[in-house]
Image: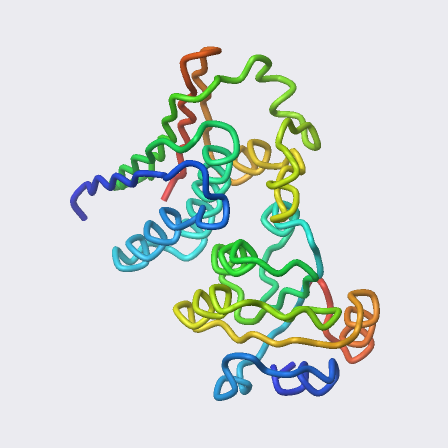
Amino acid sequence: MKLSEVRDILDAEVLYGEDELDREVFSACGSDFMSDVLAYVKNQALLLTGLVNPQVIRTADMMDMKCVAFVRGKQPDENVLALARERDMVIMRAPIRMYDACGKLYAAGLRGDV
Amino acid sequence: MEAVKLVYPVEGGDLIEAGEASSKMKLTLKKLGLPPDVIRRASICMYEGEINMVIHADGGQAEVDVGMDEIVIRMIDQGPGIPDIDRAMQEGYSTAGDMARDLGFGAGMGLPNMKRYSDEMDIETEVGKGTTVTIKIKI
């Protein structure tokens, strides 16, 4: 699924990486616990989270993820966005909750494990 | 490839900034042209180690030796030590405080994750003196 589709499905606002929405992701994960992301994620390229701090970006970076989508309308601060820019990571903000965000993407064919 | 030694100080106190050393190491491993899977495993181990150091030990030092067939990462601190290593290795056991939890850590997954992604892990610790966690990852 292209990140542009992810944006459309989540009705998300792109906060960084508008030019990179052609990137393709094949699986995703949703978690507010970064240690769980580090423990269980394999090749998911999209992280959905309600946690907004620099460690989210660092965690996603360690896992070679391409995009972080903040749910529940959470707004990352400038520090978080700066880290994402340095790592060329697409950042989105979706108004809906985690459960709905995961459900919508899953229903559209984006699975957790491929 | 010649052996490369990397040394990174890990600042204590600021959990928001933790992870900088791991990011730098990851970038260097990429430049050295190591396989992506090896880079990812090494980065995760060092990142969890770095977070642990900041949460529990007020920082320390990370030393990374990149050899022909393995990466050795030593996370060295002069913190309080680990009184019960068996419990510390249990998934879900944590003595971390609210600040770590607020940032998405402190779930008792740090050391278990380091073991999960490494080929060998060794912990030397003495209460009141400090801890050295050594991780080996085969290339």
Side (left or right) of B8 relative to B129: left
Side (left or right) of B38 relative to B91: left
Residue B101 to residue A1: above or below = above
Q: Horizontal and vertical percent for residue B88? A: 61, 23
Residue A19 to residue B106: above or below = below
Residue A36 to residue B55: above or below = below
Side (left or right) of B51 relative to A12: left
Residue nearest the observer in this picture, A113 or A52:
A52
The structure residue drawn at horizontal position 48% and vertical position 88%, both measured from the top left corner, is A19
Q: Horizontal and vertical percent for residue A114? A: 67, 65
Residue nearest the observer in this picture, B54 or A8:
B54
Q: Horizontal and vertical percent for residue A51? A: 66, 58
The structure residue drawn at horizontal position 27% and vertical position 37%, both measured from the top left corner, is B65
The structure residue drawn at horizontal position 68% and vertical position 31%, both measured from the top left corner, is B91
Residue nearest the observer in this picture, A9 or A51:
A51
Image quarter (top left, top right, bottom left or bottom right) of the N terminus of chain A: bottom right
